[in-house]
Amino acid sequence: MELLRGKTLLIIGLGLIGGSLAKALKRNGAGVTVFACGRNQEQLETALLDGSIDGWCIDPVELSLQADIILLAVPVLSVKPLLQTLKGNMKAGAIITDAASVKGRIVEDFKATLGDDYRFFIPGHPIAGSERSGYSASRDDLFVNRKVILTPMAAAEPLAVRTVAALWQVCGAEVHGMQVQRHDEVLAATSHLPHLLAYTLVNTLLGHGAQREQQQQVFDYAAGGFADFTRIASSDPLMWRDIFLSNQTATVSILDIYIQDLQRMRELILQAEGDTLRQEFQRARQARNQFINRFDANRNREGNGRRDRPANIQEADNMDYLARPGGQVKGDIRVPGDKSISHRAIILGALAQGVTRVSGFLEGEDSLHTLQAFRDMGVVITGPENGELSIYGVGRKGLQAPRKPLYLGNSGTAMRLLCGLLAAQTFDSELSGDKSLNRRPMRRVSEPLQKMGAVVETDEQGTPPLRIKGAKLHGIDYVMPMASAQVKSCLLLAALYAEGETRITEPAPCRDHTERMLSGFSYPLQRSDEGRVCTIAGGHELQATDIDVPADISSAAFFLVAATITPGAELRLRHVGVNPTRTGIIHLLQAMGADIRLENTSQAGGEPVADILVRHAPLHGINVPEAEIPLAIDEFPVFFIAAACAAGETILHGAEELRVKESDRIQAMADGLSILGIENETFADGIRIRGGDIRGGEINSKGDHRIAMAFAVASLRAAEPIVIRDCANVATSFPGFLTLANAVGMQVSVQGRN
Ligand code: S3P
């Protein structure tokens, strides 16, 4: 942790949090001189004797001028007077941070004392603690695998953010970022309200006035439930008084909701509504068990080899869709952000110098896995909140070794791109994924990387997990055997670190978001032969930039087909990315007779975008031109549904890549189409589909998001309902698909729920 070495930290308030941080910094050899300031001289002496601190004072100004970083670990309402004392008694550029459970009030107090323009104040909150308080309760492992939330202001100095992040990361914590207000709302619900309830329940049982003595006997019989529920009522009363006084709005609003819920439960009991009560308890039990499992998985990450799904990514339990015929397609919608661009925004933003602000980010599981991987490598990322996030870039050489294997879920893009990046680091790493990802071919990246000097090991079948040893790379001249943007991007990322030039030639044009975005980050590269050859030299730096992620044309594709095949349909899709390396689906559908028009074309962050207007039109079958295949590679499942609704035959050859996507998409679609009564014939590299009448039936999506959504679209022309099994992975690329599908008039729901 170079950012910390040689720095002096002054901790004001040597209680549980301050004491634990001091101990953890020493245990982990952070190279920080730690001073403490407190009121209890005996405790300060103990801390000095046990080696947790290097010096202490009672009056903060005695040592504040020596500090590079000052941590305020005192109750919320003590912060303001403390800041007044510190004002004028700090080094220029000293970083100030805090550990309070409330952020809005602290920020206000800070602005009122040190002014709006102090760029070195980085509010923080470690989500760790205990009902015990004081230095005697402190532990050097208190922050291991715990989250610390930073709420930096827009104007905050990026280096100060990274330094405060490093302070907690070196103690084993995972650093997240959030907006101030959101922090206070989240904490009001998850921490402040439970404390209020615990305190209140104890007091309720304690009774008031005359009843008091009699009531006290109740405690003699209070066993596990009472003790469990009220554990946190042993917390520090002064600290909690300050928290409630400082977070009034958010705590009162969640309290009001809770009171309403309690009133409802009261009614249910009075009315003896046993079934409803049981359902309520059942719902809560399920939710709590799920939460506890995730919480424990996260805590136990330390030392258990393979890393489980990170706790902040909620992969849905399995689910089936019921798609009813007779739906409509009308309206004006915006589908979620582009998946490919979202992955790349995180990757390049993390490697850049400065802060990259992203809007329109896809909050789907795949891109969230990439985000989590970079948090695991020490990058501070605030959000995502409504698709917005800020990435505090660490520079090309600033990534830290992840403590555990990086888990990438279902995402082939994350695995292949990260493989190239990690092969060039100074540390070793391991990448793993879910069942589907662990079956996908990785030699397409490991072999060219090995030519660059990389040490990447797959298992015997050439599949994940990938074990990567950091190595020094050199440039190569590589002609890709397949038109794969993932392979190209993997090599481009490796090339940022390689000595000399890397030249990559693609057999046919495939998506070029990495090249465009590298230019957006001011990284020099040359493209020739209509973009098919890309030459790039290692050793330059990336400069942070803002990125507006357009809506994903691959998600829009489901609606392009839905509207095209549905009589009377008319739909406008807003702000869709129409990069020419992605618009194959539009060309193919137009060649079949579709009525698709682009309007309001413009540029967003180096990518062309447009609104797309699509109306119903009768289709006829086509021979798919091979050059269009890489430009429509992810859209074939839903394109096959268009083919099933077209007059005559549609024939596809040269698309063997479809067999190694999230599922074997040729087979999965052929099986499903046959069940729905659509005649087809598969080839090693494609399929022939004869359009016809679609029946109902039960389809297995094979856990592939795009197969699931394609068959949901098929229901618009089906005679009977279609049940689609195994649809949870729709959340990898298209969170909110069901809501949007129903908003335009389709009739798709989770089976068993209305
Ligand atoms: C992607 C490239 C394509 C595509 C995938 C996303 C990317 O994969 O299928 O969904 O973001 O680079 P291939 O490179 O394997 O064709």
Image: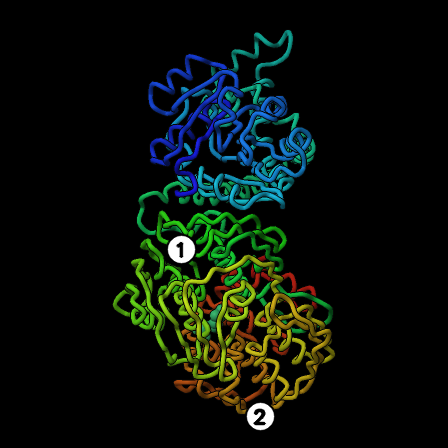
Under 8 Å from ligand 1: the CB of mark 1? Answer: no
Q: Earlier in the sequence, mark 2 or mark 1?
A: 1
Query: Can you say which quadrant of the picture contains the C terminus?
Result: bottom right
> Given the current orientation, which residue lies at the most extreme left position?
460
Which residue is drawn at the image coordinates 72% and 76% (left, top)?
Answer: 599
As drawn, 481 above or below 260: below
- Nearer-the-camera pick, 149 or 455: 455
Which residue is drawn at the image coordinates 59% and 43% (left, top)?
Answer: 156
Which residue is drawn at the image coordinates 40% and 44% (left, top)?
Answer: 297
Disc 1 marks a residue whose amino acid type is Tyr
- Nearer-the-camera pick, 207 or 131: 131
Q: Residue 219: image x %, image y %? A: 50, 15
Residue 203 left/right relative to 368: right
Q: Is residue 437 visible?
A: no
Marks 2 and 1 in Cβ contact (< 8 Å):
no
- What number is the disc on residue 407? 1
- What number is the disc on residue 648? 2
Disc 2 marks a residue whose amino acid type is Gly
Q: Residue 659: image x %, image y %? A: 41, 77
Q: Secondary structure at mark 2?
A: loop
Q: Residue 3: image x %, image y %? A: 43, 42
Q: Secondary structure at mark 1?
A: strand
As drawn, 28 above or below 421: above
Query: Can you say which quadrant of the picture contains the N terminus?
Result: top left
Residue 515 left/right relative to 435: right
Q: CA distance from mark 2 to mark 1?
A: 45 Å
Which residue is drawn at the image coordinates 51% and 22% (left, top)?
Answer: 235
Determine the image quadrant of residue 621: bottom right
